[in-house]
Image (spheres, rainbow, N blue to C red):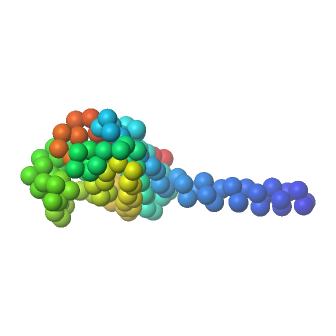
Amino acid sequence: MMRKLFAIALLCLLSTPLLAAECATTIEGNDAMQFNKKTITVPSTCKTFSVTLKHVGKLPKAAMGHNWVLTHSNDKDGVIADGLKAGAANSYEKPNDARIIAHTKLIGGGESDTTTFDVAKLKKGETYAYICTFPGHAALMHGTLSIGS
Ligand code: ZN
């Protein structure tokens, strides 16, 4: 009996941080203009999901800035083009762009930023796109996000 209780207590201790970790992920950007993940799967059981972008490089934001911007796949090119027009003063994002579902700040080497969004905003079965909108980066810095089971 005691052993069983102990096992349950241990399971609770172990599962709490695991459950929390499932509704968040970390993605790295580097000085070679690359994300370290090509796909992100959001568990459907999550109410909110957090993405932390970590710039593991050394170059400053003006030379090698990275952000993590989530859009519908077919909005991706428009978000990139308008981001370019918006310029550095707007972190290469059109202000109040309704096509941007979630985004982090534009960061430089050694920095990190986290964005949290409602999973209810996403549709199961749809494949979303994430990109870095810094000029020229999206060609290499892109990936897909979808809802898992
Ligand atoms: Zn970038």
The answer to which of 141 and 128 lies nearer the viewer is 141
- Provide residue 143's location: percent of width, then percent of height: 32, 40
Please state if 17 lies on the left or on the right of 98 as rendered: right
- Provide residue 116's location: percent of width, then percent of height: 39, 61
Q: Quadrant of residue 14?
A: bottom right
Query: Image quadrant for the N terminus?
Result: bottom right
Residue drawn at x 55%, y 58% is: 20
Q: Answer yes or no: is residue 98 visible.
A: yes
Compared to residue 131, the image places residue 105 above or below, namely: below
Q: Quadrant of residue 101?
A: bottom left
Residue drawn at x 63%, y 60% is: 16
Residue drawn at x 32%, y 39% is: 31
Compared to residue 77, the image places residue 12 above or below, namely: below
- Provide residue 102's location: percent of width, then percent of height: 30, 58
Q: Answer yes or no: is residue 70 visible.
A: no
Please state if 103 lies on the left or on the right of 36 as rendered: left
- Provide residue 58's location: percent of width, then percent of height: 35, 44
Residue drawn at x 23%, y 56% is: 100
